[in-house]
Image (cartoon, grey):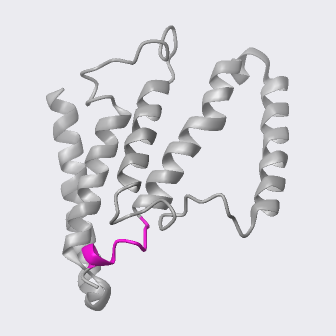
Amino acid sequence: MLDELMLIGATALGLIILGFGIGLADRRNFHFGWLAVAALLVIVNDAAVTRGFFSFRGLPGFDANSDWNWSGKILALAVSLAIAALPVFGWRNIGLTLRQHQLRGALIVTVVLLVIYSTMAWFMGAGGGTRGELAFQLTMPGFEEEVFYRGLLSSRSTAPLRGG
């Protein structure tokens, strides 16, 4: 567990150093407070995805006989949704609404990609993965990562944290 903690600590420190360096190039739009919050969010998300940096190996009913991290992704999604519910973020402000401007186009692309990847998996046979693997890959990474990376980390709703 110590190795995992050191790795995420180094990742957060690298994020802060890199972000600070980039922020110096655009000082008007740079706010160290938001960079610190973003680094903290990365640590919290990684702790959830790894179920406590691998100290807790799974939730009952999700990881039985599976190499796929169902419980970690579900936990990370739940944590991201809980953080998004805080007033400083807000679900609507991070893009979590039922109202979408490009819903028809997104649904068309989704169906086309599902057909393509399902067909590829079918013809690959055993090497293409099981139904459980396909179900995981079609759902959990996208759900969890969209809420975290495209929602929380790129949120415009955190003006108080950004200094304006």
Residue 99 found in image quarter: bottom right
Q: Is residue 147 above or below residue 69?
A: below
Asked whether, in this view, residue 28 is left or right of residue 77, the answer is left
Towards the viewer: 151 or 136: 151
Q: Position of residue 34 (x, y in %)?
A: 26, 70
> Residue at 34% of width from left, 63% of height from top?
87
Determine the residue located farthest toward the front in the rendered image: 87
> Residue at 28% of width from left, 24% of height from top?
54
Q: Position of residue 97 (x, y in %)?
A: 60, 60
Q: Is residue 37 above or below residue 142?
A: below
Q: How many marks?
A: 0
Q: Position of residue 67 (x, y in %)?
A: 50, 18
Residue 2 found in image quarter: top left
Towards the viewer: 148 or 54: 148
Q: Position of residue 63 (x, y in %)?
A: 47, 15
Residue 138 found in image quarter: top right
Q: Is residue 142 above or below residue 159?
A: above
Q: Is residue 150 magenta?
A: no
Q: Is residue 161 magenta?
A: yes
Extent of the magenta region: 154-162
> Residue at 18% of width from left, 26% of height from top?
1
> Residue at 26% of width from left, 30% of height from top?
52
Asked whether, in this view, residue 138 is left or right of residue 19, the answer is right
Q: Is residue 55 above or below residue 90?
A: above
- Give the quadrant of the C terminus: bottom left
Determine the residue located farthest toward the bottom in the rendered image: 28
